[in-house]
Amino acid sequence: MQNELKWPYRSQVSEIEHLSADVLVLGGGIAGCMAAIAAASKGQKVVLVEKGATKRSGAGGSGCDHWESAATNPCSGVTAEELVSAMLDDNDGYNNGISHYIECREGWDRLLDIEKMGGKIRDTDDEFKGADFRDEATKLLFAYDYKNRFNIRIWGTTFKPAMAKELKRLGVTILDRVMVTSLLTKDGENGAECIGATGFNTRTGKFYVLSAKASVMAMSRPARIWLFSAAYPGLCEFRPLQCIGDGHAMGWRVGAEFNMMEKSVRAEFSSAGRSFPPYSTGNNHNTWYPASLLDATGREIPYADRDGNILPDVKSRFYPAQGQHYFLKGGAIEQAKYAYDGPETLPYETLKQMGYKLPFYADLSSMPELERKAIWGLMVGQEGKTNVPVYKNYTEAGFDPTKHVLQCYGVGWTSAEFLPQERQLFGLPGGFMNDWKLQTNLSGLFVGGDSLFASNCYGHAAATGSYAGRYAAEYAANKSELTLPHQPQVDAEIKRVFAPLQHADKGGTTWKELNQAIAKTMQNYCSEIKCDELLLSGIEQLERYQQEIVPHTSAANPHELMRLLEVFDILTVSQIILQASLARKSECKKLEFYRSDDNGQAQKPFITVRHNGKKVVSREIPLNYAGDLKSNYEKLNAGYLKELENGQ
């Protein structure tokens, strides 16, 4: 009671508010905002629910330095088909061809939409006039491949506020500081049509019952599965603390199907006390590409092209090798088959044999002025992970890119040596399975952004979010009336959500303790090398947490309750990962999936998992299930393409 009196917000824990919409958008990040804008633009009544504050929430809310795969921009030298073919080939087919084709085909359209909203995408002040990466006619700035020009440098810190303003202009109802806790289904049945969701205000505790004709899942990918720092929870993950995969968990509980959940990678980008945040120390993969690097003696470390030829100058780092059409850089792929090899890709032993000495440094001072200005003033200045902690703070501390160098950590040979059991859902992780309308196996539930399997990057989130919103609007328009929530399903969720508040004075387990226990369990039983015995032991351990620990957890206020419910969702996601790993019986290098009890079969398909209410069900799906990308996309989106042609 004493803690409750100190809480600065009026308690509304016993209050329930019912809201309805044509389209309900769950998550107010990049994908969610674009989904809500698309649905509202089609004349639908839209409600958007966001755990944080929509103006700056989500993994991309604080900024972004480049927009990938804008294949249809007027300067592009590659097609959407070429880019997606490379993405699929680079991952041996273990990728989401549908969502990435949407990204490449519609990404430029979404960038133009954001420009109309007030986001800055061009060098309108002629700050970079005359640069090799600038197109003088359009004033667009390009990154990485200066010949083919399909990655666009942007002023990403302007984007999210512009989206928030557009949401208000369109009359979208925004519920900020509301955590979504469950999906509602027709008659409360597993696998049935999605008819809405529930949530609660993380400051007042008010409970919301949200009914909708169609819903868009636009939440983040999971996090804090293997690594968690109870002492420094704000630095536990590469993405914001609130981005932990709530949507995956609530989808699993009502029978949604998931793909590639067995994939996890070595935690090279973690910040959980195990590595220095990589984007703040000359990370050469995207934001800093292609900054010159020096060794401890001041000797420059060379760049090589795909054929191993040393590049003679800075300019040549931006152009394809002889006979190479184009190359990918900046996170579009994970294994750089098509990319230049930067210094960070060379093994340290090779560099040691060449006479290079640690530590290494990013050196912008020796680069051409406009290239230096583009990396430090634009890329580092606009990327959300570096805008304040690096650009602002380092500048105020006296860092001058024309004079100083920056010591590199977390880049291949200088990163912390992570243990095999320290994994992370990075790169192209698992997520909801989707069809060509980005609809899940639950009718009425569409999905965009990081909720999708094999999600990646800002442009992908914006394009798929908008696309999902478009088809959710169509679904809602064709449905005559709302389906009322199943009251027993709502009552059960209210009981589950608020139970920890009843234990506040009883000294129950806290969210940090449970999160740390889950992470340790996943390290022990879902490490790099897997086998049935380990996985089954992990499943049993997590089930014990579910039965024995969860009922005795406690929270003192709505904010702590939010954190605890997040950890309940982390527990559920961990169970999904274990079940997906159990379903795949043979090794798969591209999924970074290895077994000590490999069955020796060439198990190549996707393997999806879902919980049907009684047991886990898995099935195999061909890697090419999407069919011919161009023809299937154009057949389904003829109306959209006609609108583009008519300038609507």
Image: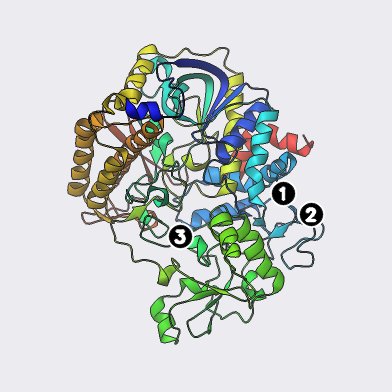
Closer to viewer: mark 3 or mark 2: 3
Cβ atoms at labels 1 and 3 below 8 Å apart: no
Foreground pick, 490 / 376: 376
Q: Is residue 595 visible?
A: yes
Quarter of the image for residue 552 reads top left
Residue under label 2, please give it: 124
Q: Is 609 drawn above or below residue 363 in the view shown?
A: above
Cβ atoms at labels 1 and 2 below 8 Å apart: yes
Disc 3: CA contacts within 10 A as few (<14), some (14-19) or many (>=20): many
Q: Is residue 623 left or right of residue 105?
A: left
Residue 447: % across, % down: 51, 34
Mark 3 vs 2, N-terminal side: 2
Q: Quadrant of the N terminus?
A: top left
Disc 2 residue type? Thr
Foreground pick, 589 / 629: 589
Disc 1: CA contacts within 10 A as few (<14), some (14-19) or many (>=20): some
Which residue appears at 54% of the width and 43% of the height?
99
Disc 1 residue type? Lys
Identify the disc placed on residue 277. 3
